[in-house]
Amino acid sequence: MNGRDPLPASAGTLCLYLSELATTHKYSTIRRRVSSINMAHKLKHHLTPSKEVEVQALMEGIKREIGTRQKLKKALMLQESSLRYLTKIRSHLPTNGNGFFVNFVKVQNGFLHYNHHF
């Protein structure tokens, strides 16, 4: 552990870890890691190091440098034959008793829309 105590982690230890993560990971991943570290500290009744000013300033800097914008993906377009097939199998899918399909993908205008209940 590089001579550092894992719990409770100091603000300096967390800053070193987050700085290293920032070279290879997205901001959202780093936020999830910070949340996990916070939870580990709370479960052991320690103060969370992410509340320290140094850690918050570092996170703001990482956010500014890496950014938080997610890359958009193109929508999945289906061929006409796939649309006919999905429409055909829809009548065989289970419902929740109220006529709603459970965990099924809705096809609308050639696009797939995941919907828990529709």
Image (cartoon, grey):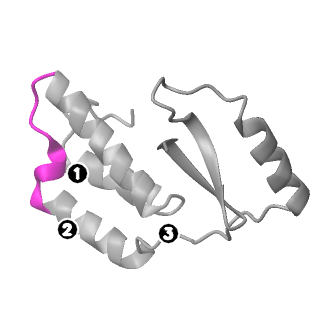
Tell us which disc is closer to us: 1 or 3. 3
Q: Which residues are magenta?
A: 44-53
Could you tell me how far apart the alpha carbons at marks 2 and 1 are, in whole angstroms? 12 Å
To which quarter of the image does residue 42 belong? top left
Q: Where residue 33 appears, x then y in whole percent?
A: 37, 44
State how many labels appear: 3
Vertical relation: 11 (above or below) 1: below
Amino acid type at image mark 2 = Ala
Could you tell me how far apart the alpha carbons at marks 1 and 3 are, in whole angstroms? 29 Å
Q: Image check: 58 left or right of 46?
A: right
Could you tell me how far apart the alpha carbons at marks 3 and 2 are, in whole angstroms? 22 Å
Q: Quadrant of the N terminus?
A: top left
Look at the numbered disc 2 and give the secondary structure of its residue: helix
The residue that appears at 51% across and 58% down in the rendered structure is 25
To which quarter of the image does residue 62 belong? bottom left
Local crowd size for mark 1, using a 10 Å CA cut-off: few (<14), some (14–19), many (≥20): some
Q: Image check: 43 left or right of 34?
A: left
Look at the numbered disc 1 and give the secondary structure of its residue: helix
Q: Nearer the viewer, residue 76 or 92?
A: 92
Amino acid type at image mark 1 = Gly
Q: Which residue is mark 2?
A: 57
Q: Where residue 90 appears, x then y in whole percent?
A: 71, 38
Which labelled disc corresponds to residue 70? 3
Q: Image check: 5 left or right of 113?
A: left
To which quarter of the image does residue 36 belong? top left
Task: Mark 1 or mark 3: name the one nearer the start of the chain.
Answer: 1
Q: Which residue is mark 1?
A: 12
Dominant SS in magenta = loop
Q: Where residue 92 appears, x then y in whole percent?
A: 72, 28
